[in-house]
Image: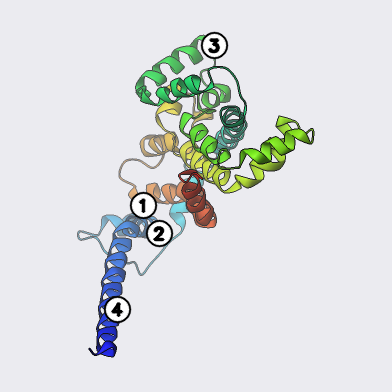
Amino acid sequence: MDYSKIEKNAKIRKTIFQAITYILLTFWAVIVLFPFYWMILTSIKSYSAYNSEFIPKFFTLEPTLQNYADAFTAVSLGKYLANTAIFTIATTAIMLVVITLAAFAFARLDFKGRNLLFVLFLSLMMIPNELVIITNYVTITNLDMRNTFQGLILPSVTSVFYIYLLKENFEQVPDSMYYAAKVDGTSDLKYLLKVLIPLSKPTLITITILKVIECWNSYVWPRLITDDENYYLVSNGIQEIRENGFGRENIPAMMAAVVVISLPLIILFLVFRKQVMEGVSRGGTKG
């Protein structure tokens, strides 16, 4: 038997398989990235050039940044970005404190009915989001918090899924480490801050990024609880831009605004993409 020939054929098959894989991945990447390319391309076309194209062109020889200037002068895009940054930072910070303490309680503290309470807690994920929104709307309205940052932030400061994800991550730390810390006189809070949080850093980074994206893209709740332009977020501001800013026909200016709004999230994900993947994989692996 000619083992060298068999090995050569195996290498050829492997090379062909890798080539097909890369071709398919490249094709899929083009499909995924094309909307972003088209968005950026449209944003650098002038209004007249865009409207004169009977057949859309995939490039432009006369790019312009005027649409980006208009995005900040014709409408209150800067205010929308500032409101969204305040909402996102405050909501994410408060939520991290809440879910970290809750996850620690379910993972390490021994109290009566803990498992039953956690099961009931997880069952909240089965409740349709529409019912939660209605309840939150009535509560916030009764508390006279409409058109306030408190009304925007409070309903979003916890997450059953993130508590579950973080609890599973905490439970990967051996119990012996916790008992040894207790023998040394370490308090639960100090153990959480000095041991669990540093060991769970990838998961916490993942949760933070996902929450930031969730807050930045939030639409239904801010649209429902605010009708004052001073509290509009970027997702709600897009509609305001379309109706009262650039008009329904000025697509290039609209695209420029969307690029400005999307850029922070794209940069955030590109910078922390490795931590996101690591955190998700660790959260789903126990032992």
Query: Mark 1 near mark 2, Cβ–Cβ under 8 Å?
Result: yes
Q: Nearer the viewer, residue 268 or 148?
A: 268
| Mark positioned earlier in the residue sequence (3 or 4) | 4
Name the residue located 35 percent from the left edge and 22 percent from the top edge.
130
Regarding mark 2 in the picture, which secondary structure is present there?
loop
Circle 2 sits on which residue? 44
Query: What percent of the width, then of the height, locates residue 33?
Result: 35, 59
Circle 4 sits on which residue? 15
Left-right relation of 1 to 133: left
Regarding mark 4 in the picture, which secondary structure is present there?
helix
Alpha-carbon neighbours of circle 1 within 10 Å: few (<14), some, or many (≥20)?
many
| Mark positioned earlier in the residue sequence (4 or 2) | 4
Mark yes or no: residue 80 visible.
no
Q: In the rendered view of the protein, which quadrant contains the N terminus?
A: bottom left
Circle 3 sits on which residue? 143
Name the residue located 26 percent from the left edge and 64 percent from the top edge.
57
Q: Please, is residue 200 above or below residue 161 in the view? A: below
Circle 1 sits on which residue? 252
Query: Whole-Å distance between the Cαs marked 3 and 1?
Result: 41 Å
Closer to us: mark 3 or mark 2? 3
Q: Amino acid at mark 2?
A: Ile
